[in-house]
Image (spheres, rainbow, N blue to C red):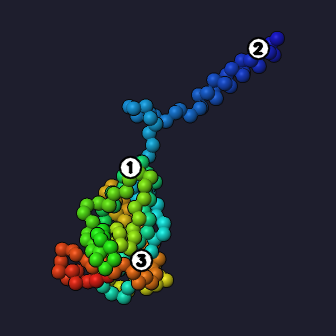
Amino acid sequence: MKYFKLTATLAAATTLLLSGCAQEPAPSSQDGSTNQVQRTQAENLRTNETWAKAAEQGMSAAFGVLHNDGEATLELESVTDKIHGTVIEIHDTQGQGTEATMSQHEGALLIKPDEAVSLTPGGTHFMYMDLKTELVASQTSTLQLNFSDGSSADVQFPIRNFSGANESYHGSSEEHDEHEGH
């Protein structure tokens, strides 16, 4: 009987000791949900089918699909070509064919949760405004996408030959009004 009492006491003590080592649940916020580390807008961005149009000089464009994997809207404020220093603008195209015109996108490019924005010839795209270096087919252009929360993502755009997308540009400066195509 002594052996049984000693075993029962040791088992109870072990249970108490082990339960003291158990992890506590994550602290809850005031609304009862558990705290989670927020991902940045750049971390919620997924890209695919990216590419840029080869060009020797002047203007060109980059295309692809930008998808938001997060729970909040992504606000793409600007695009930077850090390697070559070419100014990149976000552009929209109105109209079709040779009658199409493009202009700089007003405000941030918004990508809603679990949705995608397609950057396409004849649609919204990234515009290289005055190439500092040639975009050579089979090479890659790296663009930095800058978001409203201060985060950024470097995205690879393989360069390829493309003869389409010959819209005219109607921007704010006379110099760019004379450029045709991208």
State which quadrant residue 130 falls in. Answer: bottom left
Query: Mark 1 — residue?
Result: 72
Q: Quadrant of the C terminus?
A: bottom left
| Count of all numbered marks drawn on residues in the image | 3
Determine the residue positioned at 38% across, 49% down.
Answer: 72
Q: Of all residues shown, which one is farthest toward the bottom? A: 56
Query: Observer-nearest residue: 117 or 5?
Result: 117
Kindly state the secondary structure of the residue where label 3 is placed.
strand
Amino acid type of disc 3? Ala
Ranked by sequence position, the earlier of labels 1 and 2 is 2
- Which three-letter amino acid code belongs to the residue tagged 1? Ala
Whole-Å distance between the Cαs marked 1 and 2?
Answer: 59 Å
Residue where numbered disc 3 is placed: 52
Residue pictured at 32% horizontal, 73% vertical: 96
> In the figure, is residue 104 to the left or right of 55?
left
Give the residue at x 72% y 21%. 10
Residue drawn at (30%, 85%) of the image:
58
Q: Is residue 81 visible?
A: no
- The answer to whether one can see residue 158 in this image is yes
Image spot of residue 2 (x, y percent): 80, 12
> Which amino acid type is shown beneath numbered disc 2?
Lys
The crowd level at tag 1 (other Cα within 10 Å; few <14, some 14-19, many 20+) is some
